[in-house]
């Protein structure tokens, strides 16, 4: 579960050379890097703890006049190359290189310092330049990219700048892969590789208008799925070969989806879901694993807003864990929904409420207080789901960054309910204050700079059963907080801290249990530490695990550990001696059930 907190942050963009289109054309986050492409230049930012401009590439006025403004862009998955298509149909391929310089923590970056260089590798006019066509967005894998054209074709270009030809989307055939009349797509494993499983779709006829243009593409390599969206609102799910986009002749249409008014789409590869935005302002969720059946539809109708207020859906963006998605509208605002259909956040004020959290304001005041008042054109989550970057419709001057926290598990598998409600953000814990008021109050606990600066971001949080102690873990190590004493406890030895890569946290009474990934053995283990001391000398027990656990939970003195697919282990934990700094307690465990 996600919850927005704090005021949105603004990332300023440099002004361009008076472009005719005042609109950012591309926004993407990969590997803690944020790429922004405007009509006349590119900017590369750090999207980690410190937002710093790392590099930029500005085109000359002569280049813009001759080759047109930047119109479409795509970033290679390895972040080394950027492809830009201009309004005059020129292809620019740029190379990104990083220096050995590091971001300065604390204080201001030196003026004019760039930690990345962006250089032009290739500049060539595309073969379809003289055909008076318009282009869709661009999708890619590591070797090739595809752009949709207004004549209904898909054009393939390699990252080497090779023009590999076009495929007419109207000629895509629905074919059975196994002779049963049911076409199939490869499913995904946890590591993102195609497996022997399949995603099955019912065979169907799909009659597309020859006048339809390809306006939007989505691609999922783990699912081997290409989504093709046409200007008449039709949407095709297509399978691709194991080699990705290279083999255009292997692209096969599998199913036509939607109600004929689709305008955008987004694929959640891990959960095998597809979100389709429509002209009606509604988002439809489809289960790609189950014959692409419709799961549910979400909209703002129940909150008093119709399509006349928001306009059509303009963009959809999934969180990295695929548990929620953000929806932007053409005319006004953005909203975040859970997969189950719960509205988690909205920039659009709810009609009729008078509480301090949702005040009713007059229409002429809304533009002053409401973000994304002019609509949303682009969105992208950071790789951890802590920040949603959004671009307001018609804006080329700034990026808006919304901060999100994740809700700590309040009820385990055992049914135990925990007292303390905790939400954790990238660098802080938000503790829900239990007071007899109608207003939600949060206590912000910022993690010590000495810890979070080296281990950003927070990745795991657990509260003790009585709610008086909190445990949090970033990329490495572990940190504890005593709510009564308002004190943090950290490892005294930083080398010990850096050896811990936490993959899960639990409280077992006064003991904190860490699921640790050990680099040296490429295995997983449970570490048992007393809450009064974080040090190797106070480690109570170290238990090796079979593999990465799927779920862990605690009930009284029993510890539950489960592995994929249905392997369940229960251990009885016994502690001998007093758990105090002056004593020498001994912890033993025995297998209760497996």
Image (tube, rainbow, N blue to C red):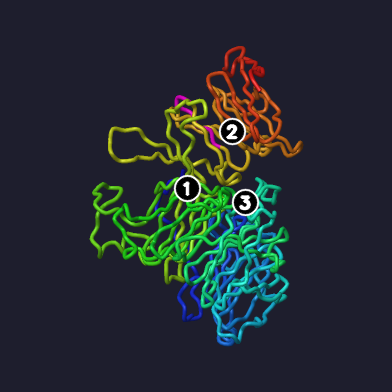
The alpha-carbon separation of the residues under discs 1 and 3 comes to: 20 Å
Residue 433 shows in this picture: yes
The percent coordinates of residue 542 (x first, y second) are 68, 25
Q: Is residue 106 visible?
A: no
Task: Quickly name the residue at label 1.
Answer: 339
Foreground label between 3 and 2 = 3
Give the labeled residue for mark 3: 199
Residue 156 is situated, as x and y percent measured from the top left of the image, at 67, 72
Horizontal side of residue 427 vs 361, given as left or right: right
Q: Position of residue 52 (x, y in %)?
A: 55, 60
- Whether 406 is among the magenta residues is no
Label 2: few (<14), some (14–19) or many (≥20) C-alpha neighbours in 10 Å? some
Instruction: Give how far across and how far down residue 538 sits, in percent.
Output: 64, 24
Q: Which residues are magenta?
A: 465-472
**Disc assigned to residue 153:** none
Quadrant of residue 32 within the rendered picture = bottom right
Which of 552/341 is in front? 341
* In the foreground, 370 or 9: 370
The numbered mark, 1 or 2, whose residue comes first in the sequence reads 1
Pointers 1 and 2 in contact (CB under 8 A)? no
Please determine whether, in this image, residue 455 is positioned above or below residue 214: above
Q: Secondary structure at mark 3?
A: strand
- Residue 551 - label: 2
Asked if the residues shown at circle 3 and circle 2 are in contact, with their CB atoms under 8 angstroms apart, the answer is no
Residue lying at 64% horizontally and 20% vertically, measured from the top left: 593
Which quadrant is home to the C terminus?
top right
Query: Which quarter of the figure has residue 226?
Result: bottom right
Q: Which is more foreground, mark 1 or mark 2?
A: 1
């Amino acid at each position: 579960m996600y919850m927005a907190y704090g005021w949105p942050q603004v990332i300023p963009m440099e002004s361009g050379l008076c472009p005719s289109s005042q609109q950012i054309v591309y926004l993407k986050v990969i590997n803690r890097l944020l790429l922004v492409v405007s009509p006349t230049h590119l900017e590369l930012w750090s999207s980690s703890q410190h937002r710093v401009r790392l590099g930029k590439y500005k085109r000359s006025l002569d280049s813009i006049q001759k080759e047109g403004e930047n119109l479409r862009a795509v970033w290679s998955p390895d972040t080394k190359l950027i492809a830009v298509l201009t309004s005059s149909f020129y292809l620019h391929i740029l190379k990104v290189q990083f220096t050995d310089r590091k971001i300065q923590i604390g204080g201001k970056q030196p003026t004019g310092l760039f930690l990345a260089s962006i250089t032009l590798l290739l500049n060539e006019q595309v073969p379809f330049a003289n055909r008076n066509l318009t282009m869709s967005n661009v999708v890619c894998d590591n070797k090739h990219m595809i752009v949709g054209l207004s004549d209904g074709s898909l054009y393939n270009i390699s990252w080497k700048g090779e023009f590999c030809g076009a495929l007419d989307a109207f000629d895509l055939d629905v074919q059975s892969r196994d002779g049963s009349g049911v076409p199939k797509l490869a499913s995904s494993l946890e590591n993102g590789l195609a497996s022997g499983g399949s995603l099955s779709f019912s065979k169907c006829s799909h009659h597309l208008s020859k006048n339809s243009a390809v306006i939007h593409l989505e691609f999922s390599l783990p699912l081997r799925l290409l989504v093709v969206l046409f200007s008449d609102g039709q949407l095709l799910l297509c399978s691709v070969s194991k080699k990705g986009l290279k083999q255009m002749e292997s692209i096969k249409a599998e199913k036509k989806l939607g109600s004929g008014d689709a305008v955008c789409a987004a694929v959640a590869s891990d959960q095998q879901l597809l979100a389709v935005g429509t002209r009606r302002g509604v988002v439809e969720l489809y289960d790609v694993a189950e014959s692409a059946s419709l799961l549910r539809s979400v909209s703002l109708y129940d909150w008093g807003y119709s399509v006349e207020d928001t306009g059509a859906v303009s963009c959809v963006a999934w969180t990295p864990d695929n548990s929620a998605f953000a929806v932007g509208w053409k005319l006004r605002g953005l909203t975040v929904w859970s997969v189950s259909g719960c509205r988690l956040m909205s920039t659009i004020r709810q009609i009729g409420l008078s509480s301090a959290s949702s005040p009713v304001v007059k229409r002429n005041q809304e533009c002053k207080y409401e973000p994304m008042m002019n609509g949303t054109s682009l969105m992208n989550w950071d790789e951890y789901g802590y920040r949603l970057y959004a671009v307001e419709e018609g804006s080329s001057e700034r990026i808006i960054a919304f901060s999100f926290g994740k809700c700590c598990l309040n009820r385990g598998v055992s049914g135990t309910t925990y007292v303390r409600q905790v939400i954790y953000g990238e660098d802080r814990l938000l503790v829900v204050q239990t007071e007899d008021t109608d207003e939600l109050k949060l206590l912000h606990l910022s993690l010590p700079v000495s810890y979070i600066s080296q281990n950003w971001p927070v990745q795991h949080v657990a509260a003790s059963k009585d709610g008086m102690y909190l445990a949090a873990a970033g990329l490495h190590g572990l940190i504890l907080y005593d709510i009564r004493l308002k004190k943090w406890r950290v490892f005294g030895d930083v080398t010990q801290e850096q050896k811990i890569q936490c993959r899960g946290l639990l409280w077992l009474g006064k003991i904190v249990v860490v699921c640790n990934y050990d680099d040296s053995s490429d295995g997983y283990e449970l570490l048992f530490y007393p809450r009064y001391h974080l040090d190797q000398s106070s480690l109570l027990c170290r238990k090796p695990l079979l593999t990465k656990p799927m779920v862990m939970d605690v009930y009284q003195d029993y510890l539950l550990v489960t592995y994929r697919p249905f392997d369940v282990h229960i251990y009885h934990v016994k502690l001998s001696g007093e758990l105090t700094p002056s004593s020498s307690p001994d912890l033993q465990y025995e297998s209760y059930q497996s």
